Amino acid sequence: MDFDFSEEQYLLRDTVRDLLRRECTPKHIRALYDDPGGRSPERWRKLAELGVVGLTVPEEYGGSGMNEVDLVLLLEEAGRSLLPEPLLEHTAVAAPLLAHAGSEAQRREWLPRLSSGEATASIGLASSPFVADATADLVVLERDGELHALTQDRLTLTPLRSWDGTRRLFEVTAAETGDDTRLAGGREPAHWAFDHAAAATATVLVGVAAALLDQTVAYVQQREQFGRRIGAFQAVQHKLAETLLLVESARSAVYYAAYALANELPDAPIAVSVAKAYASDAERRANYEALQLHGGIGFTWEHDLHLWLKRGKALEIAYGDADWHRRRIADWVYATAN
Amino acid sequence: MDFELSPEDAAFRDEVRGWLAENRDQIEHVRAVNWEDGGERFERYREWERILFDAGWGAVTWPKEYGGRGASLVQQALFTDEYVRAKGPDRINRLGLNLLAPTLMLHGTAEQREAHLSKIARCDEIWCQGFSEPNAGSDLASLRTRAVRDGDDFVITGQKIWTSLGVFGDWIFVLCRTNPDAPKHKGISFILCDMHAPGVEVRPLVQINGDARFAEIFFTEARTPASNVVGAVDEGWRVAMTTLGFERGTGLGSPAVFNRILDEVVDLTRRSPRDGGVAADDPDIRRRVAQAYIETRIFELSSQRTLTRLAKGGTLGPEASLTKLYWSEMEARLEELAMDVLGPRAELAKGSPGAERNGDWYSEYLYARASMIFAGTSEVQKNVIAQRVLGLPRE
Ligand SMILES: Cc1cc2nc3c(=O)[nH]c(=O)nc-3n(C[C@H](O)[C@H](O)[C@H](O)COP(=O)(O)OP(=O)(O)OC[C@H]3O[C@@H](n4cnc5c(N)ncnc54)[C@H](O)[C@@H]3O)c2cc1C
């Protein structure tokens, strides 16, 4: 039994953290709010050079051949720094999905390019009325429970606008599917994709929540009222202590979900639901306390806090909110227990 | 990251499981009575501890010389897990086993370990924790029980309260003020005292669930040899903090216990009538069951993370408060769910017709409320987390 990461996994996390600390600051993110493309090809290229973009692509197709456990700490960093590029859609879901259920032709055509960062992929599942980053070179789309890998010439997109100005959301108004676009395996790939997307979203949420907590702890350490730092007030301390407990506990859940997926354990879907339900609630609490404890300044556009508040809010709901996952868990508990 | 058991650990688990299965009748015989009722009933539990000790299961992680088998922390967790699944009897000497013994291993002298460890494991000495006083609860360091050096002895005078197992205790580890002039946290000593010595008087206190599980202890010039001070004289606060670390971190809340409670609650939802059906059909109850599953599962996972950290040589400092806060509040929610599932029948007491499990659910519910008070209240844990984990200013 070893519930920890390896030296190498921590090392890669630190490398990615350093890169994002330099190149994914609130200033960079604000700039993308106003940029219609909303993505930094430069940053994506650097991540690709580190092997992060193709982390989950098998080595025979030019990737690093690593798995969900290797990726989980990086997704947390993506959340912490609010990375706008589609590490979740591309690296956590679409690329390994093609490796999992794509035809040999689809794999050979796409995986090397998805791994190098030359091409991007996104994922559109029936649980969502829109597709994030649907302008990707390849969009894996759910239709009638099955998945299709579609290029842009087969798609008609209508752009939507999110309150989170870094999200690039599109309604798919038409999609030309055929036998040649279908992934093998019937409905299984859609479930696979959903569980991977939900687990990855839970992990990004943990990063968002940790960042909100850190910033709030720092803020209450310096803001003074009534002649002392507000962090000395017990009402403030208890909120933050409770939030830390939620975030730390959510970490246990998302790490295990990654492990369960990587090892294709029978309890993986439930581990995913545990992670997504708990991480959504934990982030929601961090989100509330962060704004509450910042007071008025946190409500301004000028302050950076809202960048995290909005990403967190979107992801709390994406790929099943906490109540949805609790329903799945209840059904499972009553189907299996005793 | 690897959740597979090593072959040695798997073999260990099988051995535990096999032994517990062989002793099923004995387990049922012990569990047929409540140790709280005292007398022969309590002795049955003591005999059970001896059976465990003789088979080498009394304190698995301890060195062989003290009756353990030098097992790893992972193996200890496996043992507890199997023990709870097999419905093993309450461990009546848990304060000795889980709090004092590890404290002695860290801070005790060779003589102290020699004198007490095997006796703890054999249950020859039932141990109590003498920390709280009427005016020193959360503010433990304001304690006033005095110990004065007199020749080779310390002479103890004062009062301890809420002492769990007080009426059954043979020995007590007492926090005493040995230097009244020093600042509050200095000048405290951690002293072992025989509860059968002259000058030690135990007065039982009845708890709100009717049990006599705790007591007041009065010390009137009770003598204990100076060699019974653990750590240096006047430096007992530091020793006490390690004891509290064990109590909050790994000592009391075991994942298997909460998993078992959850299983029982789920079973209850299938049998408890509600709105013409059963509770298991009610979407609100199902939602709470799911949340209970999430929380118990995460407690198990977080415990495994902690275990890995300790196994790799890490320590658990103020983070132990996160563990204690988590499980105690989870326990209260679980028991509260059981109450709501039982519905109006929840209030039916011991001896009443129609009382589910003879009113034990209610008793457990009350005890879960105590979990948020003992070993440091939830408020105290939050203070520790805020100030010592997050680094916020002390008030
Ligand atoms: C079932 C049970 C078994 C026990 N067993 C033992 C035992 O074996 N040995 C032993 O030594 N003790 C034992 N205790 C005692 C236990 O440790 C104390 O009850 C506990 O530390 C609280 O102290 P108190 O009861 O004096 O409450 P108080 O300290 O008076 O607290 C009352 C309320 O005030 C709050 N409060 C106090 N200070 C603060 C603060 N700084 N910030 C915010 N809120 C605060 C508390 O959280 C609590 O809600 C046991 C208690 C129970 C209920």
Image: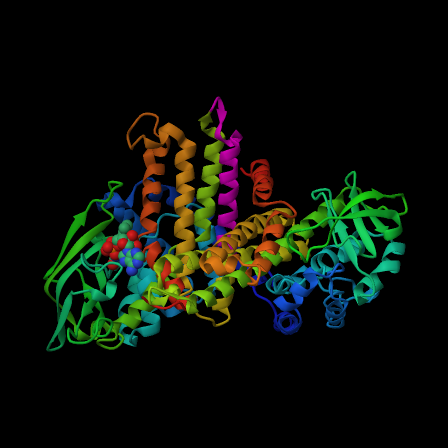
B162 to A326, vertically: above or below? below
Q: Is residue B276 magenta?
A: yes
Where ligand 1 lies, by quadrant? bottom left
Residue closer to the observer: A41 or B274: A41
Residue at point 77%, 62% (across, down): A57
Residue closer to the observer: A97 or B81: A97
Q: Residue B218: horizontal and vertical position, in percent?
A: 13, 58
The quadrant of the rendering that contains the N terminus of chain A is bottom right
A125 to A136, vertically: above or below? above
Question: Residue A49 occupies which quadrant of the picture?
Answer: bottom right
**How has the structure been colored for display?**
rainbow
Q: Is residue A95 left or right of residue B50?
A: right
Q: Is residue A119 left or right of residue B214?
A: right
Q: Residue furthest top?
A: B276
Q: Is residue A315 left or right of residue B395?
A: right
The overriding secondary structure of the stretch rendered in magenta is: helix
Residue at point 14%, 68% (across, down): B146
Q: Which residues are magenta?
A: B275-304
Q: Residue A234: horizontal and vertical position, in percent?
A: 35, 59
Q: Is residue B153 magenta?
A: no
Residue closer to the observer: B140 or B238: B140
Q: Is residue B250 visible?
A: no
Question: Residue B161 occupies which quadrant of the picture?
Answer: bottom left
A266 to B188, vertically: above or below? above
Residue at point 40%, 47% (across, down): B331
Residue closer to the observer: B43 or A14: A14
